[in-house]
Amino acid sequence: DEATMLYSGERVGAGGDPVDVAVVPLEGTNLVAKGLPGAIAVVAVAPRGCLLHAPDMYMEKIAVGPQAAGCIDITASVTANLRWVARAKNKDVSDLTVVILDRERHRKIIQECREAGARIKLISDGDVAPAVAACIEDTGVDMLLGIGGAPEGVLAAAALKCLGGDMQARLRPENEEELARMQAMGIKDPDQVLLLDDLCKGDDVIFAATGITDGDLLRGVRYFGQGRMARTHSVVMRSKTGTVRFIEATHRLERKPQFARVGE
């Protein structure tokens, strides 16, 4: 889409300690446009050099929560990964819920999940929130599988680092230009497996997200008071302490002139 974004390598700010910032101001523009669930605003911050400067291309991903950390292998079959995760979580494969983007490229993955007996939840857009949801017990999500955006993969990795989850990935360039950009990063082989620490290094990562429309992880924005007030639901987490905060905030839009017309 044509959503406003920060570009890889772009510098912002007025000084201070240098940090890496990964941000998607609206993950799920189509979701919002169609009134569908799962859209979020999301940002991750880490010391300079800790976040992979992922180019704007596709990335193959597998993500799980803390119970299954160390039990996945992106080079293995879907069936094998489902069995390993089920064993780690003391579940049957039939009790696992796997979130997959509803794309033609995922027909084989979807079929393998069905043949293995796992539950499938297809989403139309936005794979950061499901990766995070896999780490939180009461969301009903056990695993994220499939190919999505590389920058979104880095954001998901930041959250999983905070939550003790696990993730593996491989960049999937679609043309010579993307292949050259990948190789310029020092990744010569498209099949090179990127582990969680390759995507997000260190133990001082901060991740935050706010729900825009309702999802498994966060509730969406609610307007009330004749459009003069809004209620938001956010999550903020830090890897160093392991603290996770869910924040419900009420905003008086008349005191925020730049937002005052949203509900009018």
Image (cartoon, helix red, strand yellow):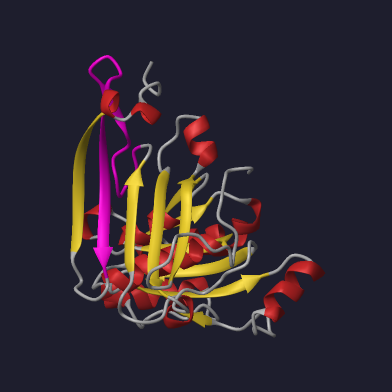
Vertical order, 234 against 262 (above or below): below
Indicate whether 244 appears above or below 84.
above
Residue 35 vertical position relative to residue 157 in the rendered view, above or below? above
The reply to whether the magenta stretch includes residue 175 is no
**Residue 236 falls within the magenta-colored stretch:** yes
Q: Quadrant of residue 196?
A: bottom left
Q: Is residue 174 left or right of residue 156?
A: right
Asked whether residue 115 is in view, the answer is no
Please tell me which residue lies in front, 170 or 176.
Answer: 176
Please provide percent x and percent y for residue 160: 34, 69
Camera sees residue 89: yes
Q: Looking at the rendering, which quadrant does residue 181 occupy?
A: bottom right
Q: Residue at position x 34%, y 52% from top?
A: 209
Q: Report the front residue among 184 and 111.
A: 184
Residue at screen point 79% across, 68% down: 177
Q: Position of residue 41 (x, y in %)?
A: 41, 47
**Image spot of residue 99 (x, y percent):** 43, 56
What span is colored magenta in the figure? 214-238
Which residue reaches farthest front? 14
In the figure, 45 relative to 182: above or below? above
- Quarter of the image for the N terminus: give it: top right
Q: Is residue 76 left or right of residue 182?
A: left
Q: Is 201 left, or right, of 170 in this rendering? A: left
Q: Residue at x 38, y 15 (%)?
A: 264
Give the image location of residue 89, x and y in percent. Answer: 26, 72
**Residue at image location 52% in from the left, 80% down from the top:** 194
In depth, the one of 16 and 137 nearer the eye is 16
